[in-house]
Amino acid sequence: MKYIWVLIASISSGVVAGMGMGGGTVLIPVLTIFFGTQQQIAQGINLFAFLPTAFVSLLIHIKNKLVDFKKGLAVVLSGVVFSVIGSLLATKLNNHILRVLFGVFLLLIGVFQISTMVYQKYKQKKEKIQLQSYHIVIGTHHDLTKK
């Protein structure tokens, strides 16, 4: 049964990684919560799994012309520098503290994603109301709620 959960975690992590969202957001919590893996070990496994999945995903994104190499270069260079700092820090931190920091990071990402989605919906609704007001002022009465 344990191997089935590892397979499910691996599949979902691969799918999420393939979409460019980072498979570690799935794999690390599964390894630490369901399998009792230490945070540092889970992060090491994630990094090991990341290399082939990132390579394959990158090739597919390049093929579909979804990679902006000029903008990406700055991210790659700064990412390499700060990954050294982050890796050294992760090896020095207590397992519990690292786990809490990772959890807070995931929580902040979730809050950011939800707030961005809510703001976009609010902005669309506001633009729709402004457009309806414009049509009323100029005398055209179209039902803008129908597509």
Image: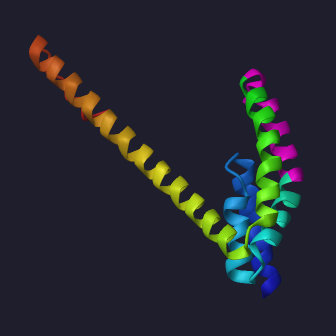
Residue in front for this viewpoint, 125 or 51: 51
Query: Residue at point 74% right, 67% down?
Result: 93
Position of 111 with respect to 20 (left or right) is: left
Position of 121 with respect to 12 (left or right) is: left
Query: Residue at point 76% right, 21% down?
Result: 70
Residue 60 appears at what percent x and percent y? 81, 38
The quadrant in which the C terminus is found is: top left
- Residue 64 can be seen in this image: yes
Q: Magenta part mainly helix, strand or loop?
A: helix
The answer to whether 143 is drawn above or below residue 80 in the figure is: above
The answer to whether 130 is drawn above or below residue 146 in the figure is: above
Residue 39 appears at what percent x and percent y? 75, 72
- Residue 65 can be seen in this image: no
Please report the bounds of the magenta region as a residue range: 51-70
Is residue 10 one of those drawn in magenta?
A: no
Q: Residue furthest top?
A: 138
Q: Quadrant of residue 2?
A: bottom right
Residue in front for this viewpoint, 78 or 89: 89
The answer to whether 19 is drawn above or below residue 73 in the figure is: below
Is residue 65 one of those drawn in magenta?
A: yes
Residue 108 appears at what percent x and percent y? 52, 56
Residue 42 appears at what percent x and percent y? 79, 70
The quadrant in which the N terminus is found is: bottom right
Q: Residue furthest front?
A: 92
Q: Quadrant of residue 101?
A: bottom right
Position of 91 with respect to 127 (left or right) is: right
Query: Residue at point 78% right, 24% down?
Result: 69
